[in-house]
Image (spheres, rainbow, N blue to C red):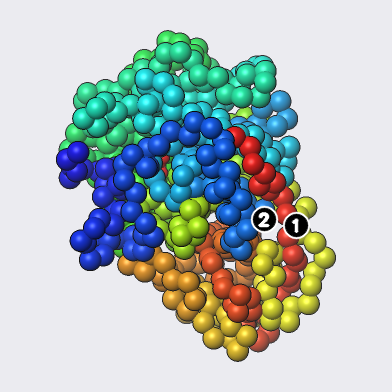
C-alpha cells in the first residue's frame, strides 16, 4: 500500500522502524517491526492472547492501582460514566502488543473509581462501519440506559478512511450492544479526521450535543458540533465550533469535551501536529480553555490563553465522565502515554495505563485537579521516610522555603533519578528524567518545567510501578509521567528541612484475564 504523507494513523504507522532505516524519526526505540496485517489482526478467540497475558503478568512494571491493559496497548479512555451507582470506563485497546493497530474498546467497572474490575471487550471492530477499529467516544446515562457513542473507523480496500459516528448501549448482561446502523457519516467539507464523539446534554435548552474532534480541509484543528432532541435519532449538523483566537492552533483537535463547572465553561481537547512553547519537541498536547460556551451561536469565548491540563511528559486524550451529579465538579481520566511515543515495556508487548481519576473544580477562577478522594482509601500506614521508596506509594512533601529539590528513583548513593528542582526566584519547577536508568522518548524531551505562580507549598506524589503523578499545591498544577525504575533505583533524596510522609498504596486493579 502506498504510504501517504498525511496526518493521523498513517503517520503513526510510518513511525515504526522499517528495514534499512537508520533510526525512527521521533518516538525513538521501537522493539519490533509490525506489518499492517499483524497490527490489524482480529482477535478471534481469547486463547490467542492467553500466553501473552501470562508472561506480561509477571512484569515488574505492572501497575497496582492504575487501570492497565491485560495485554497489548491501552490508549484513550472511552465511555466514562456513572450509571446506576457503577462507574463504567472503557479504553482503546490493541490486544497484540504495544502498537497502534486494530482498536477495541476494553471495558472495566468500579463501584468507587478506585477498585477496578476487568469486564472484557466493550466494543469489537466487527461490522462494516468499524471494520478497522472502534475508535474513541463517550457515554451518557439516560434513565435506565447507558448509551455509548464511538467512532467507527471504516477503511476500504485501498485504505481510504471513512469515520462513522456510531452508538451502542449497555445490555442487561453487562456487555455493550451496538446499534445496527451508524448515526451519521463524515462531512466532506472537512478532512477525514472527524472522530471521538463526546456526548453532552445542555441542561439549559434540554438538547443533546455531540462534539467531534476534527480537521479542516486546510489542516487546522477544530470541533464539529451535532445536535438532537433525542439521544439515538434526529442528529443534525449544527456547525463548526468558533473559538476566537484559536483558529490556527494545531492540526487536529482530538477528544474535545466541554463542561460547566461552578458556572464557568471549560473546553478540554488534545491538539496535535504542532509544538507548543514549554513542551519540548512533543507534537501532542492536552490543553484547556476557561470561558463561555454559547450554544446558540456555537461559540466558545475563552477568557485568556490556553493552559496545559498537565505539565508532564505523558498525559493525553483526557475524558470527563458523564452524570457525576455535582455542578461544582467534573471527574476526568486520561491516558498516561502519548501518540507516536515508545515506552520500555514495548519489549514485553504491552504499554500504557489510565491516570488516576481526578476531580476538577474552579478555584479563584482557575481549574484545579485533585485525585478523587477514594484514592486515599488505598494509602496504608506511613512507613519511615528514610530515603527508600516503596514501589507503589503516596508521598506527601512539604518543601522548605526557597529553592528546593527532590530526586525520586535515585540509586542508593543519591545519584540519578527523576530530578525535581524548584527555583524560587522564577517560581518554576523543573522535572528532569535524564538520570534514570531507563531512558525513553529522548528526542521528544526529557526535561520539562511547571510554572507555579504562587510558589511551591506542597507536592502530592502518586507512585505506581510504571507511572508517577504529581499534584502541586492541592491541584493548581499536575505532572504525569511514565517512570520505569530499575531494582537499584528505589531511593530518594530531598532538600533539608522538607517534611516527607510516605504511605504504601494497596493493590486495587484486579488484572484478571477477561475477554
Ligand atoms: C487519540 C486518538 C483518537 C482516536 C483514537 C484511536 O489518541 O487518535 O482521536 O479516536 O486515538 O485509537
What is the secondary structure assignment of the residue under circle 2?
Answer: loop
Examine the rendered structure and indicate whether residue 347 appears above or below residue 356: below
Q: Residues within 10 Å of mark 2 (few under 14, many from 20)?
A: many
Q: As rendered, which of 283 and 300 lies closer to the eye?
A: 283
x 72%, y 50%: residue: 508
Mark 2 sits on what residue? 64
Q: Is residue 22 left or right of residue 284?
A: left
Examine the rendered structure and indicate whether residue 476 appears above or below residue 107: below
Q: Label 2 CB, ligand 1: below 8 Å?
A: no
Examine the rendered structure and indicate whether residue 119 appears above or below residue 227: below
Q: Quadrant of the N terminus?
A: top left
**Residue 407 x %, y %:** 57, 78
Q: Is residue 441 left or right of residue 202?
A: left
What is the secondary structure assignment of the residue under circle 1?
Answer: loop
Mark 1 sits on what residue? 506
**Residue 220 x %, y %:** 24, 41
Q: Are marks 1 and 2 in contact (CB under 8 Å)?
A: yes
x 39%, y 26%: residue: 130
Q: Quadrant of the C terminus?
A: top right
Amino acid at each position: 500500500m502506498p504510504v501517504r504523507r498525511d496526518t493521523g494513523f498513517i503517520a503513526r504507522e510510518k513511525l515504526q522502524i522499517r528495514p534499512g532505516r537508520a533510526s525512527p524519526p521521533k518516538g525513538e526505540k521501537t522493539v519490533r517491526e509490525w506489518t499492517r496485517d499483524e497490527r490489524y489482526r482480529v482477535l478471534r478467540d481469547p486463547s490467542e492472547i492467553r500466553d501473552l497475558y501470562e508472561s506480561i503478568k509477571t512484569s515488574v512494571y505492572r501497575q497496582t492501582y492504575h487501570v492497565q491493559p491485560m495485554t497489548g496497548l491501552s490508549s484513550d479512555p472511552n465511555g466514562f460514566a456513572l450509571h446506576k451507582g457503577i462507574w463504567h470506563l472503557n479504553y482503546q485497546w490493541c490486544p497484540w502488543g504495544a502498537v497502534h493497530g486494530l482498536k477495541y474498546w476494553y471495558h472495566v467497572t468500579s463501584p468507587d473509581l478506585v477498585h477496578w474490575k476487568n469486564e472484557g471487550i466493550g466494543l469489537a471492530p466487527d461490522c462494516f462501519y468499524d471494520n478497522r477499529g472502534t475508535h474513541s467516544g463517550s457515554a451518557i446515562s439516560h434513565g435506565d440506559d447507558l448509551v455509548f457513542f464511538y467512532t467507527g473507523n471504516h477503511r476500504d480496500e485501498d485504505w481510504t478512511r471513512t469515520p462513522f459516528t456510531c452508538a451502542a448501549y449497555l445490555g442487561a448482561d453487562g456487555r455493550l450492544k451496538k446499534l445496527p446502523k451508524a448515526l451519521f457519516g463524515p462531512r466532506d467539507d472537512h478532512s477525514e479526521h472527524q472522530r471521538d464523539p463526546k456526548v453532552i446534554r445542555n441542561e439549559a435548552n434540554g438538547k443533546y450535543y455531540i462534539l467531534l474532534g476534527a480537521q479542516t480541509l486546510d489542516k487546522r484543528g477544530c470541533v464539529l458540533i451535532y445536535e438532537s432532541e433525542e439521544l439515538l435519532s434526529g442528529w443534525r449538523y449544527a456547525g463548526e465550533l468558533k473559538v476566537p483566537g484559536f483558529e490556527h492552533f494545531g492540526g487536529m483537535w482530538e477528544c474535545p469535551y466541554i463542561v460547566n463547572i461552578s458556572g464557568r465553561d471549560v473546553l478540554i481537547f488534545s491538539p496535535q501536529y504542532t509544538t507548543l512553547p514549554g513542551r519540548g519537541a512533543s507534537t501532542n498536547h492536552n490543553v484547556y480553555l476557561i470561558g463561555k460556551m454559547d450554544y446558540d451561536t456555537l461559540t466558545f469565548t475563552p477568557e485568556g490563553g490556553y493552559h496545559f491540563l498537565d505539565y508532564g511528559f505523558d498525559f493525553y486524550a483526557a475524558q470527563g465522565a458523564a452524570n457525576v451529579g455535582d455542578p461544582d465538579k467534573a471527574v476526568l481520566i486520561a491516558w498516561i502515554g502519548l501518540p507516536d511515543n515508545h515506552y520500555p515495556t514495548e519489549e514485553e508487548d504491552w504499554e500504557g495505563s489510565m491516570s488516576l481519576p481526578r476531580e476538577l473544580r474552579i478555584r479563584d477562577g482557575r481549574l484545579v485537579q485533585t485525585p478523587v478522594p477514594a484514592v486515599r482509601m488505598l494509602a496504608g500506614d506511613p512507613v519511615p521516610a528514610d530515603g527508600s521508596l516503596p514501589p507503589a506509594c503516596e508521598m506527601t512533601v512539604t518543601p522548605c522555603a526557597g529553592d528546593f529539590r527532590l530526586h525520586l528513583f535515585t540509586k542508593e548513593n543519591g545519584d540519578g533519578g527523576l530530578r525535581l528542582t524548584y527555583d524560587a526566584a522564577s517560581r518554576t519547577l523543573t522535572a528532569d528524567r535524564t538520570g534514570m536508568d531507563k531512558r525513553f522518548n529522548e528526542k521528544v524531551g526529557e526535561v520539562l518545567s511547571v510554572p507555579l505562580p504562587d510558589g511551591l507549598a506542597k507536592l502530592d506524589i502518586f507512585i505506581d510501578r510504571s507511572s508517577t503523578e504529581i499534584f502541586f499545591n492541592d491541584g493548581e498544577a499536575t505532572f504525569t509521567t511514565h517512570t520505569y525504575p530499575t531494582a537499584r533505583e528505589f531511593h530518594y533524596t530531598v532538600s533539608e528541612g522538607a517534611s516527607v510522609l510516605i504511605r504504601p498504596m494497596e493493590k486495587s486493579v484486579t488484572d484478571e484475564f477477561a475477554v
